[in-house]
Image (tube, rainbow, N blue to C red):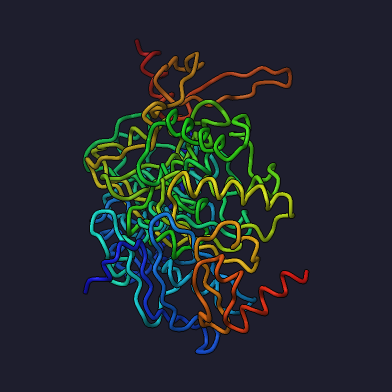
Amino acid sequence: MTTAANATVARDPHYNFGYLDESTKRMLRRALLKAVAIPGYQVPFGSREMPLPYGWGTGGIQVTAALIGHDDVLKVIDQGSDDTTNAINIRRFFARVAGVQTTERTAQATIVQTRHRIPETPLSAGQIMVFQVPIPEPLRWLEPSERETRTMHALAEYGAMHVKLYEDIARHGHIATTYDYPVIVNGRYMMRPSPIPKFDNPKLDRSPALMLFGAGREKRVYAVPPYTRVKSLDFEDHPFTVEKWDGCCAQCGATDSYLDEIITDDAGGCMFVCSDTEYCATRQATKEKA
Amino acid sequence: MNGPTNGALLSVRHLTRTWDGIHGCRDVSFDLYPGEVLCVVGESGSGKSTLLQAVSMQAAPQSGSIYYDLREQGMVDLATLSSARLRLLARTDWGFVRQHARDGLRMQVSAGANIAERLMAVGERHYGELRQAAGDWLHKMEIDRGRLDDAPEAFSGGMQQRLQIARNLVTHPRLVFMDEPTASLDVSVQARLLDLLRGLVSDLGLAAIIVTHDLAVARLLAHRTLVMQGGRVVESGLTDQILDDPQHPYTQLLVSSILQA
């Protein structure tokens, strides 16, 4: 695995702790405090140029940079995996500019930066999830004008959002939106939970961990504080449901995790494995011991 | 300050709204009663559309007042309402039919979703019932229920216009604003739409303000007509009276130009 690669990275003293300068971090922390105070509300912030392209997690990386301290333990996942290019590089980045300890163990981490997934291992109080968000505005597809969407948020005019769900049922017979599934936070603001699968939406609801969302290109942060109600939109006769699979994970046998389809050959062969690699590896290890 | 208590649904008093100090409408007053259809006729640039936008508070009036008979409060000056309340009013008790159906429709979603949108916006959350309501309205608009899941793009111009009307009427508004609803349709389709509108207005007891440059629309639909020229109302009265016995020179010109055609 990649722990060896991490170990070779030393703290680079040429960079300020956490890469960003202190005043930028303070500005971000102010924005984050406001975001936590108004759950689900998008707070604008001055997004900085980061040493990675937009769409690779510039929002998440700035939020992490503003939060991280010497004692933090950082985990970075991309599509549930700890060892993809994006995850490895962001982890190495923080090892280099902050010298913090990194980990793949969800339970050990104090900050988990993520793209697309919430770990299967339940989060605990004191942990912080940082999401990389491409488009923070849930109403954008409905209404191109920023002025209008802000007015809609201000007046909680969210009824038209159900048009999307109606259209799904009319076309597919069920709600076919599978990721970035819109939610109402604390009974007030509509929020886009970034491109996590709807499988992970229930994990947002009343989570003991703090959830922070950063959109670098769109210059917005928003938050779900611990133990906050997060309700996924649905119809009375078409309630919200999560994805289900017929089988279990081919490697660890888990039936309760989000499964990825892996193509194994050119002859149509495939298997389903856990998308959360750390969860899968831990289950396999405990199985071998037993 | 309370508005006039004469049983009107809408009272407009000395309404002025100009875009540049010159173009727009000036010092317009009229009453609209429940179930009444008012046509505003006049040439291009006479301020008809501006009047419609000002009365519906889409463009803020510069002077004058507009009173509307709210279901729960009675006559109120619209300028005193919060923007939230106005938006709710516009979504539920009013309808807006635009000249080009694609301006008033959501073209990327199905006909059913277009009709049901307002119901969802006011809190209806039962898919089956939404669908039923959308189907009923499609049927009322003389469109086959089987087209519920078709995109508006697949509809003809006349059907799109009817769909737009259904989308507005689904919350049972009491007042509908129409800006040249038939202008972009060909003559036979116009006739059919006008026929349908006439039926709807009398069945549902709708009040409507229809802006048009087509005197035939006024003749067929309107109880009363306002004639506008240069931003002012030059003549108003019962439609038949205005069309059969025009008093103002401009109205005489308008009416005679139709007869000659």
Q: Position of residue A150 (x, y in %)?
A: 39, 61
- Residue B200 location in percent, x, y? 51, 46
Regarding residue B107, the answer to whether it shows in the image is yes
Looking at the figure, which quarter contains the C terminus of chain B? bottom right
Task: Residue B143: name its quadrant.
Answer: top right
Return the residue found at the far top.
Answer: A290
- Outermost residue on the bottom side: it is B21
* Vertical arrangement, residue A243 with respect to residue B89, above or below: above
Residue at point 29% right, 35% down?
A123
Find residue A62 and report its image quarter. Answer: bottom left
- Residue appearing at x 44%, y 14% in the figure: A253
Q: Is residue B3 above or below residue B205?
A: below
Using residue B197 as the reference point, say whether residue B93 is left or right of it: left
Q: Position of residue B149 (x, y in %)?
A: 60, 34
Asked if A259 appears above or below A49 in the picture, the reply is above
Specify the quadrant that holds the N terminus of chain B: bottom left
Q: Using the image, determine if residue A180 lies above or below residue A272.
A: below
The residue depicted at 49 percent of the width and 53 percent of the height is A135
Q: Is residue A194 visible?
A: no
Residue at the location (24% across, 36% down)? A124
Q: Identify the image quadrant of residue B170.
A: top left
